[in-house]
Every structure is written in C-alpha cells, then in structure tokens.
Amino acid sequence: MNDDRCIHEGVKIRRWNTPIDLTETEFSDDRYLVSMDVDVYPTENYGDWRRSNAQFRIFVDRLNIDIAVESHLLWYYMSKLTDHPLTGKKTQFLRVWAAYQKPQTDQELDK
C-alpha cells in the first residue's frame, strides 16, 4: 500500500486501487468475503463499468494506471498500431495512436 492506495505492479503499468472494506456473506452454502461497496473497484478500473464498451482497451482506457516502464508500453502500442489497421479496427487504432503520442521523457524511455 502506498499513499492510501493498494498498488498492483506489472511489467508495463502500475495499477492502484482504494483499499476496500470487506464483509462476510453466504453464497451457495459457503461463506465469502466481499466488498462492502461493490462499485468502488470496478469504477476505479473501468469507469462506467455498467455500460458495455466493446472498444475498451486496458492500456489506453483504464483510469487507475501509471506507466511502470515506458519502453514496454511503447512496444505494446506499436504492436497494436500495426495490428488494428490489418483487422479493420479504426476506432481502436485512433485511440491507441492518441495514447502513443502522449509526451514521453528520455528518462522514461531509458528504463
């Protein structure tokens, strides 16, 4: 945990979530811990998660990510920029292109 956030480290990104309070509930004759506020986690991860979004891309649209290693994420963007036009995914291509064009520093690229 860092700054009252739970941090999930990954290769390309670092995700964060607000700590959640758990309560015990029964389901199918077993007891489980579940979030007391079931809206917090999916909202931090996906925004309006109740509305279907077939265009959602994890490394472009997530609200709760920080870039861990810029060069790894750039590799992902480059692979999608070549894949999406070949598969006719113009909307996804444009969104990945916009994310790719965000300013990057030389220090981030050296990681």
Image (spheres, helix red, strand yellow):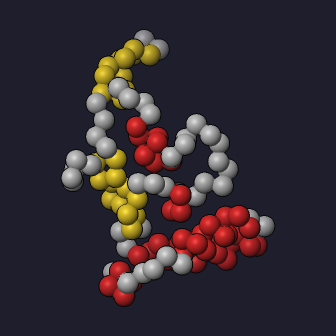
In the rendered view, would you say 28 is above or below 7? Answer: above
The relative height of residue 81 versus residue 39 in the rendered view (above or below) is below
Dividing the picture into quarters, in which one does residue 99 lie?
bottom right
Q: Position of residue 74 (x, y in %)?
A: 49, 77
Q: In this image, 79 relative to 6: left or right?
A: right
Quarter of the figure with the C terminus:
bottom left
Residue lying farthest to the right in this orientation: 88
Q: Quadrant of residue 106?
A: bottom left
8 or 104: nearer the eye? 104
Query: Where residue 97 sits in the image (x, y, percent)?
Result: 61, 74
The residue located at (60%, 54%) in the rendering is: 56
Q: Along the horizontal axis of the image, is 87 left or right of 103?
A: right
Q: Tell me what residue is drawn at x 38 percent, y 29 percent.
A: 37
Res 11 seen here: no
Query: Measured from the top left, where is residue 110 in percent x and y?
Result: 35, 86
Quadrant of residue 83 within the rendered picture: bottom right
Q: Position of residue 17 (x, y in %)?
A: 34, 47
Q: Nearer the viewer, residue 2 or 82?
A: 2
Name the residue located 44 percent from the left edge and 16 percent from the top edge: 27
